[in-house]
Amino acid sequence: MKLLTRNTDYAVRALSYIAMEKGKTVTAAELSEELKISWSFLRKILQILSREGLVFSIKGKGGGFKLAQPADRIFLLDLINIFQGLVRLNTCITNNKACPNIRICILKKKIDIIEDSIISELHPITLKTLLNEQNDVIQNELLNMQTR
Amino acid sequence: MKLLTRNTDYAVRALSYIAMEKGKTVTAAELSEELKISWSFLRKILQILSREGLVFSIKGKGGGFKLAQPADRIFLLDLINIFQGLVRLNTCITNNKACPNIRICILKKKIDIIEDSIISELHPITLKTLLNEQNDVIQNELLNMQTR
DNA sequence: ATTAATGATACTATAATAGTATCATACTAA
DNA sequence: TTAGTATGATACTATTATAGTATCATTAAT
């Protein structure tokens, strides 16, 4: 069972990198180089992000990608939805009203509750969250080095 | 994203049905009939449950399956592990120490936390839980009918 | 014009899930 | 002791999801 697939993971990395460049356009080639991710695969991911309005693309020489939204408006949940489909996929397997077995419905209710909690835990996570916490980590590292 | 696959779902149904028969052996054919699940597929699932020690099988005429453990010792998490692998699969995608990008590690930490909470929510759910709550539902139904 | 970038799209590869089929084996009962 | 009924082991196929690649068209800068 995987919570995140490669797609989503790579998308987060790419977006993070782009965010760090503060408005400068970043090419797929640069991202591929820096993040060590296959160029063609990254390109596909970036095209999707562009189509979905998360990044803004500029064609031709000097082109590349920029964030189309501020980092605190880019939600991890959106990326999961884009690349992995809705978390809320707990439809009745025997998709009918006359569930032959009520037990499974109890199970479904339990799973619903767990899915709700997954969603509510994912909900506050934005690109900004991730970038900020990274900064915190780095600052702590520096602090530790100074006090040592 | 799916939390439960068909395998697991069917396993729960089969085990629930078997549990309701209180020690009487139940054949794959009966389960298939009652639960409207393909006989061959169910058989495969039952064989796995048997191999994993969750049910106890008796071959030949009059044979079938019984629970090998009391219903409060059969954990949903075990079924998930058997049929879907560990929830805890959040290994580093770039499986090396020199993660080229610390950002993803922050993400990994977040996902770890969410996975922990999924596990702790799943943990208390046993076959008995499901059966009991089913009874509660049924009893409430009856009560409603009486008071109406 | 040439070069460097993305857009659209179609294709292949791999892995996970879902499902089927076959033969061997064990037990029961006539 | 044989016929019938059950599971065990195992191998196979089908479908779907994920991962990854390739090609040609389009746009912009120099």
Image (spheres, coloured by chain):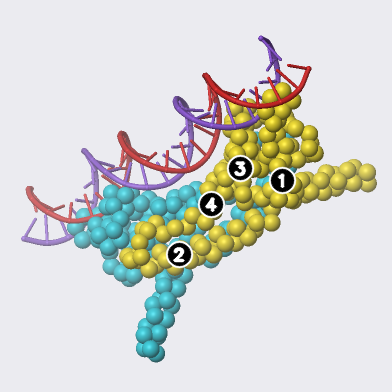
Chain colours: A yellow, B cyan, C purple, D red
Q: Position of residue A55 (x, y in %)?
A: 68, 39
Distance from Cα at disc 4 to Cα at disc 1: 22 Å
Q: Is residue B63 left or right of residue A148?
A: left
N-term mark: 2 or 1? 1
Task: Please report whichever mark, 2 or 4, sits nearer to the chain's N-terminal start.
Answer: 4
> Which mark identifies residue A107?
2
Q: Tell me which amino acid carries mark 4.
A: Leu
- Name the subunit of mark 1: A
- Chain bearing tag 4 is A
Displayed quadrant of residue A118: bottom right
Q: Nearer the viewer, residue B64 or B79?
A: B79
Q: Relative to residue D6, is residue A8 drawn left or right?
A: right
Can residue A112 be seen here? The reply is: yes
Looking at the rendered image, the disc whose residue lies closer to the viewer, 2 or 4, is: 4
For the residues labelled 3 and 4, the Cα–Cα distance comes to 15 Å
Of mark 3 and mark 4, the one earlier in the sequence is 3
The quarter of the rendered structure image containing the C terminus of chain B is bottom left
Chain-order first, disc 3 or disc 1: 3
**Residue shown at 47%/49% (left/top)?**
B84
| SS label for mark 2 | helix
User: The disc numbered 3 marks a residue on which chain?
Assistant: A
Q: Amino acid at mark 2?
A: Leu
Labels 3 and 4 positioned on one and the same chain: yes
- Of the residues shown, which amino acid type is indicated by label 3? Glu
**Residue position for label 4:** A86
The disc at residue A69 is 1
Q: Decide: marks 3, 1 in contact (CB < 8 A)? A: no
Q: What residue is shown with label 3?
A: A52
Q: Residue at x 69, y 48 (%)?
A: A74
